[in-house]
Amino acid sequence: MGNDAGRQDRARAGSKRDGALQPAGGGEAEPVLVQDPELPPTAVDEADLAPRWTPAKVILWVAIALLGGLAWTMLALVRGETVNAIWFVFAAVCTYLIAYRFYSKLIERKLLRPDDRRATPAEYLANGKDFVPTDRRVLYGHHFAAIAGAGPLVGPVLAAQMGYLPGTIWIIIGVILAGAVQDYLVLFFSMRRGGRSLGQMARDELGVIGGTAAIIATLAIMVIIVAILALVVVNALGESPWGVFSVSMTIPIALFMGVYLRFIRPGKITEISIIGFVLLMFAIVAGGWVAETEWGAAAFTLDRTVIAVGIIVYGFVAAILPVWLLLAPRDYLSTFMKIGTIVMLAGAIVLVRPEITVPAFSEFAGGDAGPVVSGSLFPFLFVTIACGALSGFHALIASGTTPKLIEKERQTRFIGYGGMLMESFVAIMALVAALSIDRGIYFAMNSSAAATGGTVEGAVAFVNSLGLAGVNLTPDVLTQTAANVGEESIVSRTGGAPTLALGLAHIMQQLIGGTSLMSFWYHFAIMFEALFILTAVDAGTRVARFMLQDTFGNIIPKFRDPDWRVGAWICTAVMVAAWGAILIMGVTDPLGGINTLFPLFGIANQLLAAIALAVCMAIVAKRGNFRWLWIVAVPLAFTAVVTITASMFKIFSPVPAVGYWAQNAAFREALAAGEDSFGNAPTRAAMEAVVRNTTVQGVLSILFVTLAIIVIFFAILHTVRSFRSGGGPSSEDPALPSRRYAPSGLIATKAEKALEREWSTVDADKRPARSGH
């Protein structure tokens, strides 16, 4: 609270200095902002913000709507033996364009009403470290790199077990009405509050009890999220010397990029990005050379536990190093790789037009005993897909670094809503990649080693026993596929990442290179995914450290001092130890760590999203904007019902494949009866590991859902109070007049370009600086 008080004092001092008149209280009172008469306007006129419809624009949007409608018709209504993958691309892109142009604009105008005359924290708290006005295009890349982790890659791959239609609908519709709404609102409200964290906003809006529950839930859920992110990397690299070598090389490459950008050629972002990309491609190719040598295969074929320990050490080091040395260059590199690879895959799908043979609703959509993910379509589809449609982890980023870098208020729509739409597109591409491969191979890769025995013969027997229509897997198919991608085996390569890599390689080889290049495309995808996920691992660890420092700072104020390195190291060690323990538990889980832990990750992540939406609902209610409260209340209600129901299943279900405590009881009884093996656990040690793991998972499930219910209850309570009183007190920072201007979207409008030209005539000493780093 001391930092917040200081922030308010500085804001008030700036108010007097710049001549801004503050509103008397909360609600929707508009501040009167006095602009500097020596500067051009800091915002486009309201009249120029209104849309101007021309016949060409009408025709364009009608065409987009018709193409999107046709794509949805082909996916949802036309029933044939196959469906062409291009309809997934068209349905997603057309729906995203319409949602961004119309729905996000509705939220901007009716719910948030940003004001570019008003300074953002990046301007009035600028310190060159945490608060830095940043070019919107660069910030979009930073934000996307931070939010896009394992979820949009892994969740859709696992959910493909249930068929193509449920996942497609939720990924696209869910992001429009829930995921992008949450990201946009949290980013805007945090920016209006000086970049405060979600936990601190919850404490301000919901009081001590609700706020404390939110802070505890946020910290605990962050541990699970980072552990699962790391587990996906472990499963992708396990027994893969090519992948281990190539991904290991990204660390010195990133360090070189950081030094280059800091000391050798400061500010040359494009230059170092090209160098980094070339080095990255070389690392992929060299990985193939190294893996083919005897010494390389021996040195880089690592046990998954060893890889897990390496990632734990990496997470600690990366989180305490200066941000410019490792994290920032990895952001640059991963953003190019992330967006570039997904756009490349989408283009390949349109050109290759692969046929999808997976049914709209599979044999496992209505049951509890799926070989990949246990549980019925409702509610487990939603918590399995997780980040591709809605992610509570994003709320931590949107209330973390990003709101401290926003240059103008209207840019929050492009970065918050637009950034989440891009992540949803990643999820759709991951789903299509998983659907494009042979169904028998899909289940052989994603079923646990306990089910397949980890052998080709065991995988063939298990998959053929599932009774899948049109599937007759043979050993030759598995061995040839593994040989094509340069791997010893693809059996039980759980975690989603290997499946996505195989799907990408399967599609890309039809466009470029044929079978001879499948191994390159496969390991290119593994590299892409590792960059995707490791960015979130080190960024998540750093954010978790900040959160823990703030929490400890309530007891020992010195922990709030960002320059106290001992405190930073202690908090980093605590968080890394916490998620590292969960990671090791997942790696050693006989039932397949990702298959067992991902539902807990999905539930925890969605509960965090419910907490974020609940805080946003309370803020909207205090603003007195009840007519449009449904924009927040509807996704909150759906998310709360889904995640609380899923939690109840995991806690109370009597089916061992679904309920943690039922599984725990079954294995304990088997141990007590003297059994040496039980279910998928081949040894007593494995049985004991199941008991231990399910105990941890069950306790965490109870903790997470209890805390989320407390937060949602207090949010509803404060919303009702605000409704009765017509609003409530505002916790926003006082409004200050801005002294800078920048366009709001990726491409400046005609009016924005005209205003930019005015600013270009301002003397250089009066023109505000902007960060591109």
Image (cartoon, grey):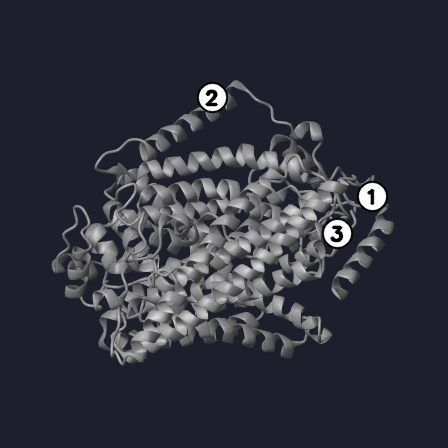
- The Cα–Cα distance between marks 2 and 1, rounded to whole angstroms, is 44 Å
Disc number placed over residue 23 in the picture, else none? 1
- The Cα–Cα distance between marks 3 and 2, rounded to whole angstroms, is 44 Å
Q: Nearer the viewer, residue 139 or 613?
A: 613
Q: Mark yes or no: residue 499 visible.
A: yes
Residue 541 place in picture, x, y as percent: 53, 67
Q: Residue at x 23, y 70 (%)?
A: 292
Element at label 2: helix
Are the residues flagged by discs 1 and 3 in contact, CB closer than 8 Å? Answer: no
Compared to residue 138, the image places residue 631 above or below, namely above
Q: Residue at x 55, y 76 (%)?
A: 574
Label 1 neighbourhood size at 10 Å, few (<14), some (14-19), many (20+)? some
Which quadrant is the N terminus positioned in? bottom right
Disc number placed over residue 731 in the picture, else none? 3
Disc 2 marks which amino acid? Ile
Residue 510 place in picture, x, y as percent: 23, 46
Of the image marks 3 and 2, the number of the one nearer the N terminus: 2
Residue 341 place in picture, x, y as percent: 38, 50
Q: Is residue 168 left or right of residue 538?
A: left
Q: Is residue 115 left or right of residue 693?
A: right
Q: Is residue 110 left or right of residue 245?
A: right
- The Cα–Cα distance between marks 1 and 3, rounded to whole angstroms, is 12 Å
